[in-house]
Amino acid sequence: MKINDKKILVAFIATPLAAALIIAAVSAWSLFRVEPGVVKLLSSPDTLKDAYLELREPQLFAGYKNWDREGNGVFNTIRFFDNRVFYGAGIRPEEKPYLELLLERRHAGAMLGVKTALFLLLVSVMGAVALAVEVKGSGQK
Amino acid sequence: MPRISRKIALLLSMLLIFTACAKKPEKANSPSIKIGIEKRGTETVYIADFTCTLKNENDSTAFLNASGKINIKDNSGNLLLPVPFTVKTILPFEAGVVLQRVELKESEAVALMQFLDISPEKILSGEDTGARPLEDVNIELAGLKLEKKDIIDLLKKK
């Protein structure tokens, strides 16, 4: 039985390409839509709570579930602000740097998404090159 | 329904079920009890102050109106004292504190003090505070009921 290399290569191109598109779309949404919105909300002391609510929803690649040493500051920030907002204490302007810490984590998550999408795109391009070689080779026979 | 739509619907519903699952507290942490004796006229009243914490390990789900029972058992598993409790709110990553005072029947008090190696005379004389930490094996969290609420929805209403 002859294995159809072209079909395998097409799947090899399509799968990472689809994943790259989805990941790129999610990351672009965060970079170009959510983050500028949060920056705007952070610029006024009256909208710090709204900024926190935006930041409380984590970016896909910067979830609030798993913690490394660097993430401890974010972890404590979330616990602190959840309490403050829940019990109606609000967020003070001098606490803005902690919100910026959450924004940094979101940005890092989005950038990780962009890099992952680029990697998957590269894999897809490699598949495309292999397919071109395969097509060219079979045409010469 | 076309086959592809059915597959997408199945995938989405699985994703929904997966993301909707929030981890409930499985055990009571740092349990301890303090037995006190009060004289009310001629009557002797035994009081147990029970404390423990319930951890919310979720990142985005808050627990509201948590209620249930903490069963204190001896090493053979015999029930010594059921402690009903309620905790109003446990926010994500927080530990809700259960602080419950129970008036004990004499039979309950005797069994509990015997198990905890507490002498009533020493409590009355002030020689012993009557406070004891409890081992995990002597504690059972039972009938836990709670409301799960998304933290962002909850905070938006504040």
Image (cartoon, rainbow, N blue to C red):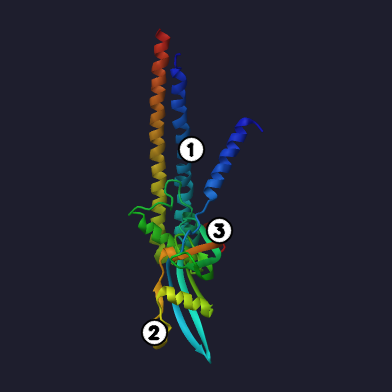
Query: At 44% from the left edge and 32% from the top edge, which residue is drawn?
Result: A16
Q: How crowded is mark 3: few (under 14 residues within 10 Å), some or many (20 or more)?
A: some
- B79, B36: nearer the viewer: B79
Quadrant containing the N terminus of chain A is top left
Q: Residue B11 carries which label?
A: none
Location of mark 2 (residue)? B122
Vertical relation: A116 (above or below) A47: above
- A116, A72: nearer the viewer: A72
Q: Earlier in the sequence, mark 3 or mark 2?
A: 2
Residue at the far right in the pictured view: B1
Q: Residues within 10 Å of mark 2 (few under 14, many from 20)?
A: few
- The answer to which image quadrant residue B149 occupies is bottom right
Vertical relation: A67 (above or below) B120: above
- The answer to which image quadrant residue B129 occupies is bottom left
Residue B16 at x, y = what percent? 56, 46
| Residue at mark 2 to residue at mark 1: CA–CA distance | 69 Å
Residue A3 at x, y = what percent? 44, 17
Q: How crowded is mark 1: few (under 14 residues within 10 Å), some or many (20 or more)?
A: some
Residue A31 at x, y = what percent? 44, 46
Query: At 46% from the left edge and 55% from the top edge, which residue is drawn?
Result: A55
Query: At 46% from the left edge and 23% from the top edge, which residue is drawn?
Result: A10
Residue at the far top in the pictured view: A141
Tell me whether the residue at label 2 lies in contact with that at label 1, contact meaning CB atoms closer than 8 angstroms: no
- B128, A110: nearer the viewer: B128
**Disc 2 residue type (three-letter):** Lys
Query: At 47% from the left edge and 28% from the top edge, which residue is drawn?
Result: A14
Location of mark 1 (residue)? A22
**Disc 3 residue type (three-letter):** Lys
Location of mark 3 (residue)? B149
Q: Closer to us: mark 2 or mark 1?
A: 2
